Image (cartoon, rainbow, N blue to C red):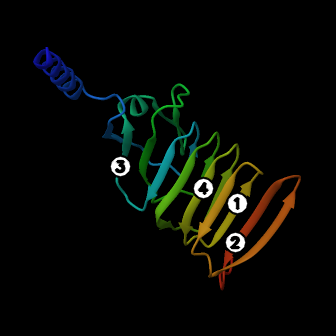
């Protein structure tokens, strides 16, 4: 009886190990078009990488990757999930060589491994979303409400102007020594 029980237990363990796990982390990539404006929503996590690559790399469960939705409108790339799902983390590694604005909403998070360069960068965070990036842009405009968070890393070389109106924070950072050309 003991042998039959142990054999059954062993066969069940082997079955589950070969059947696979739906929560197993997998990776995939997709070709993307160039974009200037990035909008992220639906609890998607995006990590910006300074690269001229034309591919986005995704990491997460198979069901989370399958739910990813990329939509282009002019120079805008919208990233969200096809259907709201509380299950499965999803991280998208995205090249950011030409980004001029980033907007997050609905629990999305955007961060960067590299400093985002350019003349002017616009950041908007709302509805429990966050943006946490490094930048070397000459001017940074950021807008966040009480549920959105924006963190700019390594900004010692900037002057700061901040105003708050009705729970909305407006911040402008200018690189010290930067003079606008008109």
Q: Is residue 80 left or right of residue 28?
A: right
Q: Which badge, 3 or 1, comes first in the chain's sequence?
A: 3
Q: CA distance from mark 2 to mark 3?
A: 30 Å
Where's residue 162, x and y in %?
Answer: 80, 68
Q: Which residue is mark 3?
A: 54
Q: CA distance from mark 3 to mark 1?
A: 27 Å
Do labels 1 and 2 touch, CB within 8 Å?
Answer: yes
Q: CA distance from mark 4 to mark 3?
A: 23 Å
Question: Considering only vertical position in the picture, is 132 above or below 66?
Answer: below
Describe the element under mark 1 as helix, strand or loop.
strand
Q: Which badge, 4 or 1, comes first in the chain's sequence?
A: 4
Residue drawn at x 73%, y 48% is 147
Residue drawn at x 21%, y 29% is 17
Q: Residue furthest front?
A: 1
Q: CA distance from mark 1 to mark 2?
A: 9 Å
Do labels 4 and 1 touch, CB within 8 Å?
Answer: yes
* Numbered label tally: 4
Q: CA distance from mark 2 to mark 4?
A: 15 Å
Q: Which badge, 2 or 4, comes first in the chain's sequence?
A: 4
Residue 131, label in figure: 4
Q: Which residue is mark 2?
A: 173
Where's residue 99, x and y in %?
Answer: 53, 56
Q: Which residue is mark 1?
A: 142
Q: Which badge, 1 or 2, comes first in the chain's sequence?
A: 1
Number of other residues with Cα within 10 Å of mark 4, as a class: few under 14, some 14 to 19, many 20 or more: many
Q: In front of the other: label 4 or label 3?
A: 4
Describe the element under mark 4 as helix, strand or loop.
strand
* Camera sees residue 158: yes
Do labels 2 and 3 touch, CB within 8 Å?
Answer: no
């Amino acid at each position: 009886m003991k042998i039959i029980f142990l054999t059954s237990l062993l066969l069940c363990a082997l079955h589950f190990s070969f059947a696979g796990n739906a929560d197993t982390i997998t990776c995939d990539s997709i070709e993307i078009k160039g974009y200037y404006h990035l909008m992220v929503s639906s609890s998607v996590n995006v990590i910006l990488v300074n690269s001229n690559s034309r591919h986005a790399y995704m990491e997460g469960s198979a069901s989370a990757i399958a739910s990813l939705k990329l939509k282009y409108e002019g120079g805008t790339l919208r990233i969200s999930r096809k259907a709201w799902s509380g299950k499965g983390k999803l991280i998208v590694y995205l090249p950011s060589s030409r980004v001029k604005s980033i907007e997050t909403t609905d629990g999305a998070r955007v961060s960067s491994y590299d400093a985002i360069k350019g003349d002017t960068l616009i950041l908007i965070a709302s509805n429990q979303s966050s943006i946490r990036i490094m930048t070397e842009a000459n001017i940074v405009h950021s807008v966040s409400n009480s549920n959105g968070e924006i963190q700019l890393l390594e900004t010692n070389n900037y002057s700061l102007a901040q105003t708050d109106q009705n729970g909305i924070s407006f911040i402008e950072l200018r690189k010290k020594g930067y003079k606008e050309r008109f």
